[in-house]
Amino acid sequence: MRATVLHVTTLFGGGVDRHLRDIARAVPGRHLFWHAGRESDVLEDPGEGRFDALDGARLDADPAALAQFLKSEGVALVHQHSVAPAARKRALQCEALLGVKRVLTLHDVLFLRPDAFEVEPGAAPDPAWLAATAPMLRDAAAVFAPSEFIAAKALEHVPGLAVNVVPNGSPQPTEVVASARAQFAEHRPRHVVAVLGALGPHKGSDLIEALPALLEGTDIGIVVIGYLDRQLFPGWRVPGRLFVHGAYDDPHAVALLRAYGTQLVLFPNCVEESFSYALSDAWAAGLPVLAAPLGALAERVRAHACGWLLPKGFDAHFVAERLRHIFAHTGPSGLAEVKSALARPDPARVPALEDMARSLDAFYRHFAIDPAQPAAGGAESLKKLVATNIDGTLFRQELVRLADEYAQVKSALDGERARTAKFETESREWMAKLERDVEGLQKELEQEVGVRRELGQANVQLQIHKDAFDLLPQVLRKFLLKKILDARS
């Protein structure tokens, strides 16, 4: 019987969640996910698709029931994926209750300070925070990092720590059907630059917002395959310049990059990445990248030479000029040359899921305790721990996130309504003015027709008089003409 690995993570994982699900699919054995939050805990069995909302107060009040339940599930190893206080607490609790070993993966630089995504890259660690996280790293049976960059950070600030680099593996791209949004065709640019994922300030959303104006007059457009913190819904944000595809499933990333005709993938990150699944997706699609010179992004681009790095302190103006240059350049450093480099075999460029699974499986086998016959009474123990009511407090963070997203959508909708109302008002005013102008023209036309009618009648009378004059004897006509000329003089 294979041991069950209990993975302790946070409620909102992002790339960590993708990593966990890859482990559950590729690493032999059974896996359970404990999503720990400040006010809520959820236990997930990915194999059965089961979720149990746990009552935090009951977990703390009846540790024996928790231990009985975990033993009934055959848990023989704890794999910690976060150093956030809630995940830290549950990982240590399960380790102690079961008497098993704990391994830990550093998925980002948050082990150095809790606000690492909000400060300048390379900021000094928070001493109090590091004092709490460093012992967790030292006491773990094994510490993993997805890149040399994160491993070096850990060694720098936790001297003597042994860190095993296990790159995040990706499965082979599958033949999935993915299409560009229909609205995209309305203003499709000639050159498409894609940005992957959910973009907030730490991923460069401010820079992306500024780019369209700086690319005006070019044939370059930005497509966000994902969404912006200021636009969640699909559609053009700036027609012809900035399009938002919206949320997508990870296996569709490569197909969507191709569906939009992407020629380059941009990484305008403001924080240090620990690995970047998005970079793997871009290279799996055979696309060059233009990336921030930070963390594992810089490490991987330098190692595999399949793109360009921006300079330190880059801004939207520099990125716009760089994009203009790349799409205008046809020499040896142009897009074609980099794409040809991407066509050459390089297994390390996009690490394989099978390689990651093989490495982790070896560690799991080494550190997991011998899985004895599962203890009985697990179902009864679980009943004691499950939340009685799934109310607002249980998923408060999720409700806050949804409320923020709703507010953004509502704000965008209100803005659209305001623009529509303004357009309607201006249209009505323009139509009223147009009607007044047409009415004035009609009156002028009627006056013109009246004058012409009078002139026509006068011409008819003159013609009659001329015909009568021509019938007079020549001597008399000369006499009358002389009299007229004498009268005028």
Image: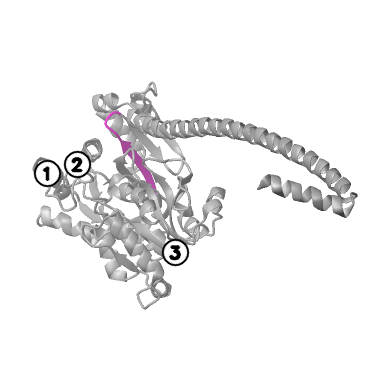
Between tags 1 and 3, which lies in front? 3
Q: Quadrant of residue 347?
A: bottom left
Number of the label disc, if any, that sits on residue 263 = 3
User: Which residue lies under the disc numbered 2?
Assistant: 114
Q: Earlier in the sequence, mark 1 or mark 3?
A: 1
Span colored in magenta: 29-39
Mark 1 is on which residue type? Asp
Query: In this view of the protein, which residue sits in the foreground, 46 or 310?
Result: 310
Question: In the displayed structure, does residue 211 sit left or right of residue 476?
Answer: left
Residue 237 counted in the magenta span: no
User: Which residue lies under the disc numbered 1?
Assistant: 126
Mark 3 is on which residue type? Gln
- Assign a secondary structure to mark 1: loop
Percent across and percent down for residue 92 are 21, 39
The reply to whether residue 162 is visible in this rendering is: no
- Assign a secondary structure to mark 2: loop
Q: Residue at x 34, y 40 (%)?
A: 12
Percent across and percent down for residue 322 are 33, 64
Q: Residue at x 16, y 54 (%)?
A: 154
